[in-house]
Image (spheres, rainbow, N blue to C red):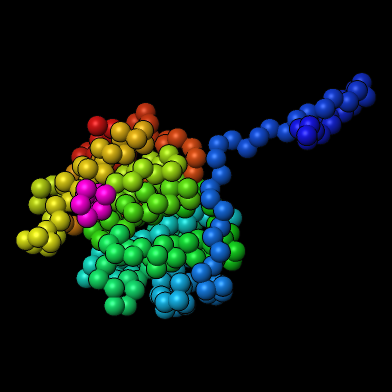
Amino acid sequence: VDDPQTSNVDEATGTTTDVTPAEPEGPAPAALAAVTNGTCPDLSTAGTITWQSNGTQRSVITVYPAEMADNMPLVFVWHPLGGNAAMMVNYLQLQRFADQHQVIMVVPDLREGAQTWGFYGNPSDDLAVYDDMRTCMSEQQNIDLYKVSTTGMSAGGLWSTYLVMHRADSLATAFIMSGGTDPLTLPYKTPTQNIPVLVTWGGTNDTWGQGSYLVEFEKTTMNFRENLTNDGHYVVGCNHGGGHTIPTEAGVMSELWLLNHTYGKPSPFLESIEGFPSYCEGPM
């Protein structure tokens, strides 16, 4: 089959030349997944949304900017254990962030009765929340599928880590706060597409739990960072030294990192990470 062609006409001479259309640059994000329960929730207005996803009742808070725009980025935000979606909206001032940058944000709550996000045990329910909301937002709001990203803290950071490894074909980037991989509990899996990642942790005191349930986030972050780097992904690491906390500069880092990456494109911070906190550093 011949390549499709269009014709350009030189108005001065009347001559016609055939022009082959340029191919789109870079890969396209993954196709939209079928909605697990067949029906999207009504996303016409922001707020708390409850619907059936993968046969389970789920709840998310959606945050819309005061002034909606075309091709808005979509950011998923995942809370730590002991927290909830409302806490993340308030603590990270997500409404102000959405208003300033014209971003749509989806902040899920943990499934009722679940011990943690789907990085532990069966991931299908939480993967369904991500896939369903990506599809439904694309159908009902003017989002840019090249600008979908994920962020989270602690258990939410571990779940964002899982998404990097299993949904890189639909994510532009990720900002992982106290997440990472562990050979025994959350083994590394090579992402299917190149994805730049920002990781933060709070030094050697960044731990959660105790005894056999102790998670040392400096170690898990380093494991994830090394594996990603060895696989050719661009990683910026930030040790804020504050223990198991969300860094005070999380808003600045989210603005710089999450909003300036585009699916299939190299990171704009390859040459310089100017603007990030002084404790951040580029590739190892």
Magenta residues, as a range? 179-187
Task: Judge whether 233 appears above or below 178 on screen.
Answer: above
Q: Residue furthest top?
A: 13
In the picture as drawn, the residue positioned furthest to the right comes out as 14
| Residue 253 visible (yes or no) | no
Query: Where's residue 240, x and y in %?
Result: 18, 46
Quarter of the rendering occupied by the C terminus: top left
Instruction: Name the residue rendered at 28%, 39% in the picture.
Output: 227
Residue that appears at 18% across and 57% down: 245
Residue 214: percent from left, percent from top:
11, 58
Q: Is 184 included in the stretch rendered in magenta?
A: yes
Q: Is residue 213 visible?
A: yes
Mainly helix, strand or loop, the magenta region? loop
Q: Closer to the camera, 76 or 10?
A: 76
Q: Is residue 130 inside the magenta stretch?
A: no
Q: Is residue 130 left or right of residue 90?
A: right
